[in-house]
Amino acid sequence: VEFAGTHLIIDLWDVCRIDDPEHIEKSLCDAAVRAGATILSSDFHVFTPNNGVSGVIVLSESHISIHTWPERNFAAVDVFMCGAAKPHKTIEALQEAFSPSRIGLTEHRRGLSV
Amino acid sequence: VEFAGTHLIIDLWDVCRIDDPEHIEKSLCDAAVRAGATILSSDFHVFTPNNGVSGVIVLSESHISIHTWPERNFAAVDVFMCGAAKPHKTIEALQEAFSPSRIGLTEHRRGLSV
């Protein structure tokens, strides 16, 4: 058994402000910091015509990504962190930033040989 | 039910060339093209002292990420694609690039309300 890190798959429904790339980037950076992660770079793109946003923050501990569908009020996030970072702490930051009415969460423990 | 896209969580064991960032970036770009995806940007980082690599390719259709642990011969990949792209086609490219002896694959259909 070799544990590489925790990978959270987070679906957010009935969210707000997911067409605002500055808000999204700031919120994800805040989430990374709260989890104790170190940000190496971030890269965000906005799509037309719906103002969907795709963004990735590369961390020393792996990454956070988000893809948003404003026309459906849906956002797909994933948070992968190894080492001492605490990926579950990002969930509170996502709730504050996007006010989802419902969250779907799946956790993968990457690298475990079964 | 609103389907946003397919998200593959791919663990690769007993891999080769995962300390070579140029090979990794080229291979992931090749995987994206084979899947019919459009590359928007790519961002790769190398870590010391083990030459682990973290990289993300942002696509029009979402993203591909990789994090490698050369000292364990392990790589963690995820492939998220929406639209007409075919994410499973990346697996063949990953096999050719890194020659894993074993692959762990989990598929999430993001955005489906249950």
Image (tube, coloured by chain):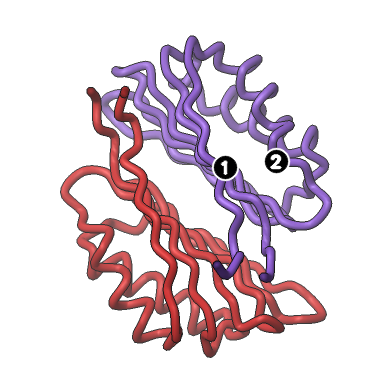
Chain colours: A purple, B red
Query: Quadrant location of residue B76?
Result: bottom right
Task: Check whether the beta carbons of the residues at disc 2 and disc 1 lie within 8 A of each other.
Answer: yes
Q: Quadrant of residue B82?
A: top left
In the drawing, does residue A61 fall left or right of residue A25? right
In the drawing, what numbered circle is on residue A30?
Answer: none
Q: Chain of mark 2?
A: A
SS for tag 1? Answer: strand
Tag 1 subunit: A
Q: Which residue is mark 1?
A: A8
Tell me: residue B31, above or below residue A15. below
Q: Earlier in the sequence, mark 2 or mark 1?
A: 1
**SS of the residue at dot 2?**
loop
Crowding at dot 2, Cα within 10 Å, few <14 / some 14-19 / many 20+, comes out as many
Which of A90/A26 is in front?
A90
Q: Amino acid at mark 2?
A: Pro
Is any atom of residue B9 visible in this view? yes
The residue carrying mark 2 is: A87
- In which quadrant will I find the C terminus of chain A? bottom right
Count residues near mark 1 (Cα–Cα under 10 Å), then give few for <14, some for 14-19, many for 20+: many
Label 2 – label 1 distance at C-alpha: 7 Å
Residue B60 in sight here: no
Give residue A30's position: percent from left, percent from top. Answer: 73, 30
**In the image, what residue occupies the spot 45% across and 29% down?**
A11
Amino acid identity at mark 1: Leu
Please tell me which residue is depicted at 39% across the width and 62% down the height of the picture.
Answer: B105
Q: Nearer the viewer, residue A1 or A56?
A: A1
The image position of residue B91, as x and y in percent, is: 32, 71
Residue occupying the point 67% across, 81% down = B72
Where residue A100 sits: x, y (%)?
51, 14
Residue at the far left in the pictured view? B84
